[in-house]
Image (tube, rainbow, N blue to C red):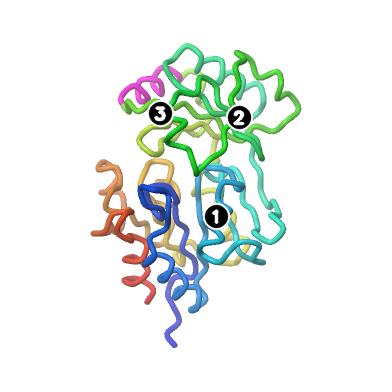
Amino acid sequence: MAHPKYKMIVSDLDETLLDAQGRIPSKNIQAIQKARELGVRFVPATGRGYRSVHKILDAIGLREMEREYVISFNGGAVTENKGERLLSFQEIPFQKAEELYCHGLSYDVCIHVYTKDTVYAYRLNKEEKDHVEGRLELQEIFTDRLDFLKGQKIVKILYQNTDCSYLNQIEEDLKPITADIDVSYSSNRYIEFNRKGINKGFGMLFLADLLHIRPEEIIAIGDNYNDLSMIQAAGLGAGVCNTVPEMKPLCDYVTNATNDEGAIAEIIEKFIL
């Protein structure tokens, strides 16, 4: 049996591993299984929290597995699946989280506030409710301060609006307060804020170091700017066909298949099998 050049695949979930209905195409499941039989790890990397990926882990046979991992909150957490053992958790200082929250109030956005176990949503609109259904549980809040979360760790804040140019403008506006924040985009509807230096690339390299895997032995796959840090840090950085057009030139490989057509299977068949 050939020994694969790559030892770990790190894959984004929404718009990458998952189809438009939030399911994993069967050809992806089969390809992941074949790669794992060759000893290649498969690590989901998501902007969501760990609890929202239980069904996905069930589908690919990684739920409650020892020495199998998930990168969540855009790299803000790395968890071993067995017993949901938290290995790394990188929160935003409370004062900064509150500052980002309060600035968000003056924009036409729905605001998400992520703690380890709960996602709070302010100004939740029907479109956003429909979008996250089945993917994410939101607890709606109606307060213009985050006092109720004092003493809890906040790992991520995001603003939602489906007008990407509006989100770009917000990024420009907030430059004076985001010098110590990692800013990224996802799903063509979110601008996301993590602690400085905390992104999917950080989570991937933290895990690789733990497992004694070199960056050049990793394939990272994604579709949007919150995936770019891991795509650029991996030995092979791949974008799926539906990747944001401006990002495609920054990928080593772009699939012919979209996320609906089994893009992950295409990469595994080409570079592992």
Q: Residue at x 48, y 18 (%)?
A: 176
Q: Which residues are magenta?
A: 165-174
Classed neighbour count for the residue bearing mark 1: other residues with Cα under 10 Å, few (<14), some (14–19), many (≥20):
some
Element on which disc 2 rests: strand
**Mark 2 or mark 1, earlier in chain:** 1
* Residue carrying label 1: 55
Whole-Å distance between the Cαs marked 3 and 2? 16 Å
**Mark 3 or mark 1, earlier in chain:** 1
* Residue carrying label 2: 139
Answer above or below: position of 89 versus 58.
above
Residue 212: x and y, percent?
59, 67
Please, what is the three-letter code of the amino acid marked with disc 3? Glu
Is residue 144 highlighted in magenta?
no
Q: Are marks 2 and 1 in contact (CB under 8 Å)?
A: no
Q: Residue at x 35, y 20 (%)?
A: 169
Residue 94: x and y, percent?
67, 25
Whole-Å distance between the Cαs marked 2 and 1? 20 Å
Q: Residue at x 62, y 15 (%)?
A: 143
